């Protein structure tokens, strides 16, 4: 409870603070043979570092999402100028096929997380609970999958992908 309150002074979200403290304890448990006691200062520093890493990740994620939003708005403006025709619908189906091929090339864990997010509409928290992994790990898998799609299909295809599936 003290560590959660300490983490909340950094992240301002009690649920994320609990998740961070939980991650710290999981890390401590996995390396318990290497620790020396007392560990009070180590706990505080670990929570502080995890909070700072979370904040850095959050800022990076927001920057990426802002970039996607700007590209998406520009693409939607261009897309709305044109009428949908059968050729465009065929191109959309081809894009879906390409996206599925790229998704199939992801690592097993990353693909599983991303498919649950994309196709089943599960939130990162729901996926984390189901897979017994942290929410941050789920978010990293989703970001890695999106980056891989953008790398494989190009930035315009990444925007089309967002339009097709409507998940950001």
Image (cartoon, rainbow, N blue to C red):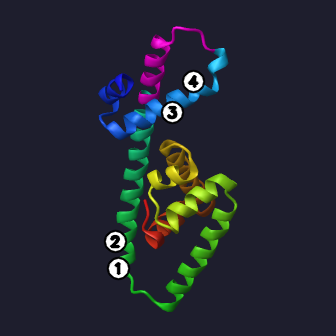
Mark 3 = which residue? 23
Locate residue 154, reporting x and y percent: 57, 61
- Picture layout, residue 117 above or below residue 18: below
**Residue 55: % across, % down:** 40, 34
Foreground disc of the pair 1, 3: 3
Give the label, 2 or 4, closer to the camera. Answer: 4
Residue under pointer 2: 77
Residue closer to the observer: 41 or 153: 41
Q: Where, quadrant-wise, is the C terminus in this rendering? A: bottom left
User: SS for tag 3?
Assistant: helix
Residue at mark 4? 28
Residue 147, above or below 76 = above
Query: Badge 1 local density, few (<14 within 10 Å), some, or many (20+)?
Result: few
* N-terminal-most mark, 4 or 3: 3
Nearest to N terminus: mark 1 or mark 4: 4
Which residue is pictured at 56% across the width and 45% down the height?
Answer: 133
Residue at (47% x, 55% y) in the render:
126
User: What residue lies at 46% left-to-right and 28% top-to-bottom?
Assistant: 50
Q: Do the residues bearing badges 1 and 3 touch, measured as CB atoms within 8 Å?
A: no
Looking at the image, which residue sits at the far front?
Answer: 1
Left/right of residue 10 with respect to residue 94 in the rendered view: left
Separation (CA) of disc 3 from disc 2: 43 Å
- The magenta span reads 35-51
Judging by the rendered image, the residue that carries numbered circle 1 is: 81
Dot label at residue 132: none
Between disc 2 and disc 4, whose residue precedes?
Answer: 4
Instruction: Report if the CB atoms under discs 2 and 4 are less than 8 Å apart.
Output: no
């Amino acid at each position: 409870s003290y560590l959660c309150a300490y983490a909340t002074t950094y992240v301002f979200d009690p649920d994320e603070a609990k998740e961070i403290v939980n991650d710290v304890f999981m890390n401590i448990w996995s390396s318990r043979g290497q620790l020396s006691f007392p560990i009070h200062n180590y706990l505080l520093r670990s929570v502080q570092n995890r909070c700072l890493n979370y904040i850095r990740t959050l800022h990076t994620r927001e920057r990426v999402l802002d970039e996607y939003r700007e590209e998406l708005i520009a693409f939607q403006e261009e897309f709305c100028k044109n009428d949908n025709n059968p050729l465009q619908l065929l191109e959309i189906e081809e894009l879906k096929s390409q996206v599925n091929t790229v998704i199939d090339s992801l690592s097993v864990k990353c693909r599983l997380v991303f498919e649950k997010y994309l196709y089943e509409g599960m939130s990162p928290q729901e996926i984390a609970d189901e897979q017994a992994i942290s929410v941050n790990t789920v978010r990293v898998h989703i970001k890695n999958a999106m980056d891989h799609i953008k790398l494989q299909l190009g930035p315009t295809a990444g925007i089309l992908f967002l339009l097709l599936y409507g998940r950001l």
